[in-house]
Amino acid sequence: MTPILSAQNLHFVYGEKTPYEKHAVTDISFSVMPGEIVGIIGHTGSGKSTLMQLLNGLLKPHSGTVIVDGQNIWQDPKAIRQYRFQVGLVFQYPEYQLFDETVEKDIGFGPKNMGLSEEEIRKRVLRAAEMVEFPPHLLPKSPFDLSGGEKRRAAIAGVIAMEPKVLILDEPTAGLDPKGRQTILDMIRAYNQKTGAAVLFVSHNMEDVAALSQRVLVLSRGKEVLFGTPKEVFSQPDVLQQMSLDVPIATRILDALSQKGYALQKGIYTIPDAAKEIVRFMKEGDRHAQ
Amino acid sequence: MEPIIQINDLEFSYTVEEDATPIPLFQGVSLSIEKGSFTAILGHNGSGKSTLARMLNGMLLPDGGTVTVNGMDTTDQDSQLAIRKTVGLVFQNPDNQIVSSIVEEDVAFGPENLGLPSDEIRKRVDHALQAVDMLSYADHSTNRLSGGQKQRIAIAGVLAMNPSCLVLDEPTAMLDPKGRKEVLDTVRRLNREQGITVVLITHYMEEAALADRCIVMEHGRVLLDGTPNEVFAHRQTLEQTGLTMPAACQLAYELQDMGISLEPFPLTEADCIAALEKTLSK
Amino acid sequence: MLNDITFGQYYPGNGVIHKMDPRAKILFTIAFIVLSFIAGNAVSLLLVTFALGAVILLSRIPLKMYLKTLKPIIPIIILTSIINALYVSSGKVLVEWQFITITSGGLLTAVYMSTRIALLIMCSSMLTYTTTPTQLTDAIERLLSPLKYIKLDVHSLAMMMTIALRFIPTLIEETEKIMSAQKARGADMENGGLLKRIKALIPVLIPLLISSFRRASELADAMECRCYHGGKGRTRIKKLHMGLIDLVSLIALAAVFVGVIFANACLSGVLYSLFIGGVL
């Protein structure tokens, strides 16, 4: 299978040749397969936001290439806009970018910029609204009259309506209450399963990353530190903690017990799995532990 | 213990649009917050948490019932400044509560409004910055700080008025894990070391587990009220309202379902590790 | 990009200039700018330049920081120089080519004018580098306070300035973010005619406006919670008082003033002929 999105040796520098020069992204390479969910973690200033904007051509790398569906996106700089439709980017707090008179028009902003017909726009708006479980009767309303959670979903629908091959979300659950967080996470999973689009999402919440992603990319100071399955990444808690990054609490608890001499398995990152491992250990002792 | 804030039969309605019929939110809520306590208030958006916070210092006034702070009724115009000085409010977005471009000048804003003499303001500003561990940033620009630092400055700005109670409305919602920890550590320290009463409104169950008392609100009613242990024992009620539980509790419940019970029932990660160790060593 | 604006930037420090009364600093800055425009010949202009040099030295802020502020106005300096050089005709004719005539007087005026603009910029950066925005607005509030007799709410005006200075960087950052977000949805802000570009700004301006209103209302709440109730009975952390430093600088300023007047009056003729005659 060929990757749907791949970054090759990306470099990006802010304020080049000024006293404020900052290497935001240094030599990052990775590939995302179609239909894959990739979690991106790293603390504030690790280069996550820059990386995301490089992937959909909002920023141009100083060196390196971004390949979307086999095409180098900077092959023809004039055609860069079309890659923004293929790699949809949802910024942090996207509800602050709503602007149109009605929710319907706002969600249709992207498709309209793509130059689609009225009929096709309408179809896509309805599909996107359904995907984020946005109640259709609210579509003719002003986006500013919605509740916080509804606004967030409407804003995400605005990107989904472009039907991108890759969807990137920057902290999609930030600032929401537990119910709102869960809705968004379920929605991301459902979108990925229904459309087969690849999803990349940035999160500070390790539990969310552990629950959702097939692979995890760990960034620190603009560099790629780890890239692998959650099991591979979370079985190295010391590497993550060195970069003052969190590890899922299940991993932390089992790790602490391992250090006290209980031979529990490494690389467990969800609460149910942790419970199962503890029960197994109590039944079997450390006979089968690795 | 003596209450610092007393709420009796609170009633409050709000209107979404002008001329529309008011929607009742609180219909007879009674609560008291004890001096020196650390209370966490949990609940969904729209459960009335933030409205309640704004009633505690008279930013919003009750339609019925009373809210008193140290015996002062919040509806009494003459006590307004005294009440706001006693109960300091910190909001969610640190950017939107910083008035000045320089750290120490922002922290001085409150005491300046109280009309204190310059040397007293200076003392209070230094003291407040010290309390949030930001003294070395006194002459820095507020724009270049991290989210956690900005929120600590906002807390210092309230502390400089020498409040006896701090009400924080989701102060960590917009922060990264590092900032969240900075703010939470600061708040806990202020409660423990300076005896400041804390009311923390939050979505994070891990934060609530650190309080002396948890109040869960739903649709303007107090659904659960008790120590974190008591509140998180109501597993079903919490799951029904869609509120999660601290991860340590989740693990303990998961194990309970499989026939292993942890003693004592853990709320925090450290407790959970200790309890597991006890169980495993048997 | 937009973030490069250094407007109103404070440079923390502890030098004598930092300690001066901001009111005195504002008045001196104005006086200084006036002086540099009064200075009519090389000697008096040099005197003003030296005086500013001394102040820069005293401010203990790297010279590099001052030179940086000159960078964005280089085009303006070049433009005014060219205009001056071309249109002022006095003294000897140096170059004559088709309709272009450059005279020694024109060249001199161009040099003077460029120096004055540079002095003006460096002098105002000195003010903003050494004075916090709050001190500045505070000083303006005091200086304008007589205006309250004509029913002008000077306090609110000063408060608005403080808040504006505080929120400019925040709003610039927000504008950039909204622009990127709309571009990510295919908004095209770089191409097309004027009308199309103006229309393309709507998806940026509306969220920005709404967000500003939200910020304003949250800030108003936060200010009220911190016992703000207008300017009445409000005290300040830094009391303003004119001290010894301000007196000394007043004397120094007066000396420069006298020097400039003297140089202007007595030396202008002598020097002019010397310079023109000597060089050419």
Image (tube, helix red, strand yellow):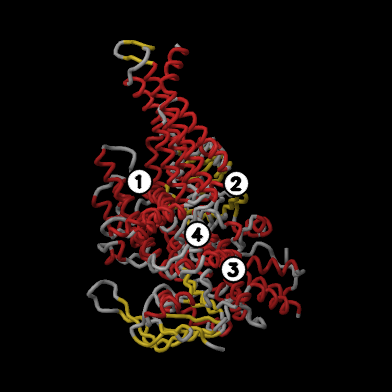
Q: Are the residues under marks 2 and 4 on the same chain?
A: no
Mark 1 near mark 2, Cβ–Cβ under 8 Å? Answer: no
Q: Are the residues under marks 1 and 2 on the same chain?
A: no
Bin the neighbour count of mark 2 within 10 Å (Cα to Cα): few under 14, some 14-19, many 20 and up.
many
Q: Quadrant of residue B277?
A: bottom right
Q: Are the residues under marks 3 and 4 on the same chain?
A: no
Residue bearing mark 4? C239
* Chain of the residue displaying label 2: A
Q: Tag 4: residue type?
A: Lys
Q: Tag 2: residue type?
A: Lys
Secondary-structure class at tag 2: strand
- Residue C186, labelled with which disc? 1
Cα–Cα span, label 1 and label 2:
29 Å
Q: Is residue B173 visible?
A: yes
- Tell which of C44 and C234 is nearer to you: C44
Secondary-structure class at tag 1: loop
Secondary-structure class at tag 4: loop
- Residue B186, labelled with which disc? 3
Mark 1 near mark 3, Cβ–Cβ under 8 Å? Answer: no
